[in-house]
Amino acid sequence: MSCRAAPWSRPSHIAGPRVPTPARPRFALGSRNLWKNSWTIGAGVSNMFALPSRLFRCMASSGSGDGGFARSTSTDEAVAPLPLYSWPDKQRPRVCILGGGFGGLYTALRLDSLVWPNDKRPQVLLVDQSDKFVFKPMLYELLSGEVDVWEIAPSFIELLKNTSVQFVRDSVKLLRPADHFRRGPGEPCTGGVVHLESGTVIEYDWLILALGAEAKIDVVPGSADYAIPFTTLEDALRVESKLKMLERKRFGESSPTIEVAIVGLGYSGVELAATISERLKNTGTVKAINVQTTICPTAPQGNRDVALKVLESRNIQLFLGYFVTCIKEASTSDDSSSTVTYSEVDGDHRKLILDLQPAERGLKGQTLEADLVLWTVGSTSQIPRLQPPDAPYVIPLNGRGQVETEETLQVKGHPRTFAIGDSAALRDPSGKLLPATAQVAFQQADFAGWNLWAAINDRPLLPFRFQNLGEMMTLGRNDAAVTASFIEGLTLEGPLGHAARKLVYYLRMPTDEHRVKVGISWFTKTAVDTLASVQNAVASSFPPPTKMGDATATNPSSPTAAMDPDSEVVFDFQPYLCQYKSGRIHRPGGAPTVPACTDPATGVVSKDIRAGPASARVYLPPGATGKIPVIVYFHGGGFVAGSPARPGTHNYLNDLVARSGAIGVSGYYRLAPEHKLPAAYDDAWAALRWAVTLGDGEDPWLLEHADLSRVFLAGCSAGANIAHNTAVRASAAGALPDGVTIRGLALVHPYFTGSEAVGGEMAFGPEIRPFMDRTWRFVVSETVGLDDARVNPFVDDAARKASAGIPCERVLVCVAENDFLLKERALWYHREIKASGYAGEVELFESKGVGHAFHFDMLDSEQGVELQERIVAFIKK
């Protein structure tokens, strides 16, 4: 390769005025500011990039189609400046990696781990449109509750903090490779430039294309409007939110079953079908559709047989040999010509209709109903749309839009560009395209890193050879299929296969530090589950005493006698808790926690302390100076689950404290049913008292920074209920020290109820009110039921007077549009407190298109940011 050993020195930039940098894209808090310089590009600077003049003239800076950075028809013509990414070093090689999936991130880490000559150690820049790396093979575990978001979607900043790799969050707009041009003697080699959506231009010496593929969802009429793909973290969180909404709406024996349609039965479709069917159990049906008459046609026979056995054993209907021709929303009127009744259900939620046509002879067309449609077939490469409009074939592509590469992973005709993962069209020795799997991307990242090292150091490059180590699929919380290619005929299944798959993915976590954190979390969950199993075994070995004359005592063959008390559910409070007849309490997902620490994304520092008789986690914003507000926050979880150390709550509070610039205090309160109310109320009061007495006069953060004239109470769900009751308690004379002012009460998706339906609750099924009564009695020691003022704060004149007297200047009530159980009661609270005689301001905010407590899993979504900014504005008002 003529370009491989070219000198790395480049001419310095020509003299000229600098121009201000244009508006920059938003980055996650704590990211490094890499946008240092912007240079005018225009007439007389054609060699600015040390590129051949003919190359510079054809490099467009926008989609205008005129094919130039700046066409200099006149020396007086005004030229718009382009922001140019400033590399830290002007001499060392510049490597730009586009895409932060398995291929891109692992290549960056590989490059950083290699030993380099000092003058040739490259500067590595990783560009991705997300701020998180997503371990995509474990997205299914988000739906089953086995993992938390932080475990499989850590931030790039966290992963790269101990490396020299730079990270930029942006999307790629245009590729302008230059390594295919012939150069004259003495002309230095360069790779080309990349244009980002923010307008920034990156000049590079070496380029790694690892952009992956996007879901192709607009395949049939209605699929883009009604179906949800399952390829990204956002997709998984959206599906989780939809399932939670449906589970809340369909709670109760008389409720209709939840129907989920899955289009495609490759690996992704089968794993989704198995995971969702296990989650829904008898409350739902999965309808799985595949155009072929078999599932997972490319999978090893062992995996296919195990998967088919699992699917047939669960509440899954298989429609093999069919393809979907249309997806539409059910009509509200009956259609006598159709066998399906098109009816509106659950208020604003409508059924979806899928039209199926046979792909095989002998089958008849069918029409299916579904509440949720998941689309797992088809993908499209991102590369074709990134080609320059004036040179649409500069990067060679196959018919599927993938980049044609040499065996060394270099793009054909482009010696300074490598393509890996889903972006690459590389074939095995038999001529078959390599599959778009994480295993291929893992191995290609290792080779790409080595070959880039070899190219920069003028060493021979290695041809890539894929080693198929086997294939794995998850089939539920404790089930999987694993076929190892090096042991013919061996397929691990069930719990053993599940453990093997999880171990492999644990070892594949990107960094040692993240691997340790995830290992501790998984070990803790496993230990909790194991301890619960041991307790169950012990409890089941001591059957409860029976009364004289009890039929089960004299007839051991009766159904009641045969029922295992450790498997018989007496109270099901999903998704938080399940109690068995033996007394065993099971909390799905265990109780994962993260330690108090300095958050790398926001810079917020946290610590755990004793807060009088209780405990609390305290958060200090970065760069805190002077006196700042204090937020006392109470987590949700139905009074039975959660803590400030739960990953979702901890990350949320880091973000809230960073955005608001306030000190955060979040109490660890005791959980029911082990510690029934009022235990949580008492612990919450202790946390507030501790905060407003400056940590009993001993906490340095509060002593230095707490402004006790600006105290706010906040909480979500059950935590919002606690916040309200804490505010009521604070209204008593002398309850708080002099000088303490509670400025505001922020209630997010608050948990309130009552014996009489209000507003839209009139449409609830007959089982909802008894369920709410059982749930409330389950968490409280002594109560009159749903007319208890603690859960029904306007039930009578005394409760109304107490609520009207809360010592807050303002109240903010936040609701979610799809919060089936609690939205109407929150709106009722908003109306009632305004009418109660409360003297302060009352505000209402609604998040559209999302469900209860959505923001913990969707903190970076549009709705999550909007909700957070609304609360921050409430605090800063």
Image (tube, rainbow, N blue to C red):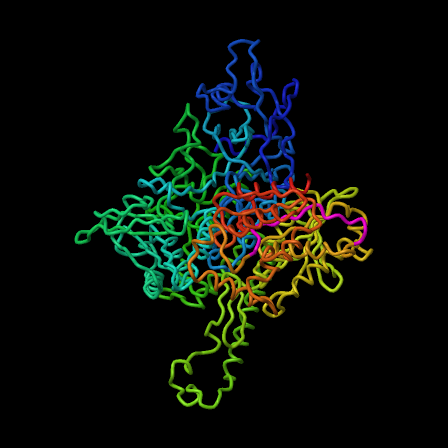
* Magenta stretch contains residue 740: yes
At which x and y percent is residue 40? 60, 20
Task: Specify the quadrant of the image occupied by residue 779.
Answer: bottom right
Q: Position of residue 707 (x, y in %)?
A: 77, 46
Residue 700: x, y in percent? 80, 52
Q: Quadrant of the C terminus?
A: top right
Q: Position of residue 801 (x, y in %)?
A: 66, 54
Q: Is residue 470 visible?
A: no
**Closer to us: 448 or 809:** 809
Residue farthest toward the right in the current orientation of the protein = 697
Q: Is residue 633 above or below residue 37?
A: below
Up-down relation of residue 791 to residue 189 (above or below): below
- The residue positioned farthest toward the left in the image shown: 362
Label tally: 0
For this orientation, the residue located farthest to the front is 797
The residue that appears at 62% across and 43% down in the rendered structure is 842
The reply, left or right, for residue 689 in relation to residue 289 is right
Residue situated in front as seen by the camera: 491 or 371? 371
Q: Would you say residue 361 is visible in this rendering? A: yes
Instruction: Report the span colored magenta.
Output: 737-752
Say above or below: 846 vs 752: above
**Up-down: is 659 above or below 538?**
above
Q: Is residue 154 magenta?
A: no
- Residue at image position (17%, 54%) is 362
Near-viewer residue (561 or 13) = 561
- The answer to whether 160 appears left or right of 298 in the picture is right
